[in-house]
Amino acid sequence: MPELPEVEHVRRGLEPKVIGEVITGVTFSDKVHSGKEAGKETIIKGIALQSFREQIIGSAIRAIDRRSKYLIFTLENEFGEQLIISHLGMSGAYFVVDTLDDIGIPNYINHWHVELELQSGKKLIYSDIRRFGEMRLVRRLEEAAQIMAIAPEPFEAGAEDYFTAQLGLKKWQQKKIKEAVMNHSVISGCGNIYACEGLHAAGINPHRLVQDMTPDEERQLFKALVASLEEGIRFGGSSISSYRNVEGKSGQMQTRFKIYGRQTCGTCGREVEKAVIAGRNTHYCTHCQK
């Protein structure tokens, strides 16, 4: 699943290509149509396909922001502003191309689901191999409960204090620290990969209970998680399976992992331990992480 660094790279790739463009048409794949007809919320959530189409055609794309793992497209038309809130799910990707075939990656060509026609003649295409992603149309950010529940961005002033305050809540005290840091109400945008890397960098075993963490360890961990996320952004995100940026390219962060997906620890060379915590595969080193 794309995490904060990957989504940030998608945002940065889209921004110069579509800001100022006007949406002139919308087309949905057969899978989206059949899903809606079967009562499923396939990609387009909380609104009928025709209503979605009618409400965004003629709108200009004024901004693309990111909140945790969500992209937020600000649209403007004669009736005012509205927002498309989009999550990439496990395998979603956006492309700006002249034709579908210009994507150049067969899996993403075969699994396109939403095509926004732009005034310039370009197409903004959302592809999603597993169809776990989503697009929601709202008038105000406050209408999106999933966004309002997210912790502050980890790079913002005060985010560290928020992080330690959340860990101090009773509901987290008996949980493993790995489970806590993957929750977006504790720290924004940190999923499985960067949780493993951050815990390793901080020297903290993922099985540790939150109640056994010292205040110094909590702050050390926060800094390590932020450093891992920042490194992920610098190196274009992680392409473990299907992630591609707007240019169709893979990220390079996976070449810098010290623990995630490795057989031996990138710090000490000992064998990497594996476990499942909160339903996610966890990699750690019992020598480096206490």
Image: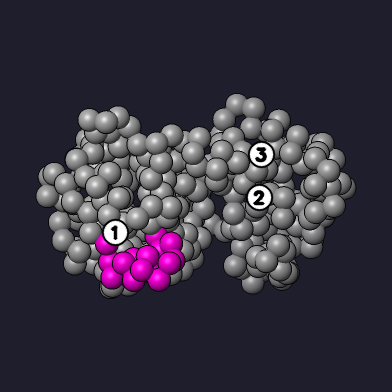
Whether residues under marks 3 and 2 lie with C-beta atoms below 8 angstroms apart, the answer is no
| Secondary element at image label 1 | strand
Please tell me the numbered disc located at residue 183.
2
For image coordinates 32% across by 46% down, the residue present is: 13
Query: How far apart are labels 3 and 2 at the CA level?
Result: 17 Å
- Looking at the rendered structure, the secondary structure element under dot 3 is helix
Q: Sort mark 3 into few (<14), some (14-19) or many (20+) by Cα contacts within 10 Å.
A: some
Q: Which residue is mark 1?
A: 114
* 254 to the left or right of 123: right
Q: Looking at the image, which is closer to me, 249 or 3?
A: 3
Q: Which residues are magenta?
A: 28-43
Mark 3 and mark 2 lie on one chain; the one further toward the N terminus is 2
Of the numbered discs 1 and 3, the one sitting upstream in the chain is: 1
Q: Is residue 244 above or below residue 167?
A: below
Three-letter amino acid code of the residue under disc 1: Val
Residue 212: image x %, image y %? 87, 47
Task: Give the Cα separation between the discs numbered 1 and 3.
Answer: 38 Å
Relative image position of residue 117 (x, y in whole percent): 18, 51
| Circle 2 Cα neighbour tier, 10 Å, few/some/many (<14 / 14–19 / ≥20) | some
Q: Is residue 105 visible?
A: no
* Quadrant occupied by the C terminus: bottom right
Does 203 sit above or below residue 169? Answer: below
Q: Amino acid at mark 3?
A: Lys
Question: On the image, numbered disc 3 is attached to which residue?
Answer: 223
Mark 3 vs mark 2: give the one in front.
2
Q: Residue at x 80, y 59 (%)?
A: 207
Give yes or no for residue 32 being in the magenta stretch.
Answer: yes
